[in-house]
Amino acid sequence: MVNIFLKDDNIKVKVSNGKTLREIAIKTGASMEFGCRVGDCLTCVAHVTSGMDLLNDKNYKEDRALEILNDPSTDLRLMCQCSVEGDEGEIEISYKL
Ligand code: FES
């Protein structure tokens, strides 16, 4: 199991490999916001402050969308495009930018 810490809501939850961040947000009642849910609107951008290696790789669409932000942060991800890929560890996410 992977521990997820949603910092802005002080939510800690254990999840299994393959869970999407959207599923996790809905299940926990986190205040993470979603819009299009397909990687176009940037509503769901968040900082993954630890555990980036436990998420799926960015796809082309996510890379292109994040380029639009022109933000030098290397920890930004679109939550609607992320899923857990790992069996053990901790992921920490902050989504109040
Ligand atoms: S909800 Fe629109 S980019 Fe994620």
Image (cartoon, helix red, strand yellow):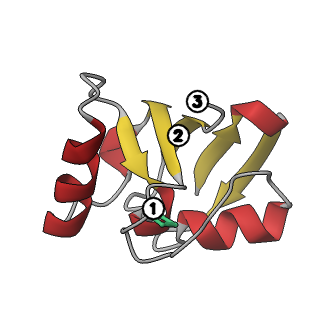
Asked whether disc 2 touches disc 1, contact meaning CB atoms under 8 Å apart, the reply is yes
In the foreground, 61 or 22 = 61
Q: Is residue 63 left or right of residue 27?
A: left
Q: Earlier in the sequence, mark 2 or mark 3?
A: 2
In the rendered structure, find residue 84 and report the number of the disc placed on it.
1
Report the amino acid beneath label 3: Leu
Report the amino acid beneath label 1: Val
Where, quadrant-wise, is the N terminus in this rendering?
Answer: bottom right
In the foreground, 32 or 16 = 32
Question: Can the viewer see residue 70?
Answer: yes
Disc 3: CA contacts within 10 A as few (<14), some (14-19) or many (>=20): few
User: In x, y percent, where is residue 12?
Assistant: 77, 43
In the rendered structure, find residue 97 and report the number of the disc placed on it.
3
User: In x, y percent, where is residue 70?
Assistant: 23, 32
What residue is shown with label 2?
91
Disc 2: CA contacts within 10 A as few (<14), some (14-19) or many (>=20): many
> Up-down: is 43 above or below 66?
below
> Up-down: is 85 above or below 5?
below
Mark nearest the camera among 3 and 1 is 3
Residue beneath the point at 83% across and 34% down: 10
Query: Could you give the CA–CA distance between mark 2 and mark 1, rounded to whole angstroms?
Result: 9 Å
**In the rendered image, which quarter is residue 5 located in?**
top right
Question: Can the viewer see residue 57?
Answer: no
Asked which secondary structure carries label 3, the reply is loop
Query: Could you give the CA–CA distance between mark 3 and mark 1, rounded to whole angstroms?
Result: 22 Å
Report the amino acid beneath label 2: Ile
> Up-down: is 64 above or below 80?
above
Mark nearest the camera among 2 and 3 is 3
Residue beneath the point at 37% across and 68% down: 39
Disc 1: CA contacts within 10 A as few (<14), some (14-19) or many (>=20): many
Q: Earlier in the sequence, mark 2 or mark 1?
A: 1
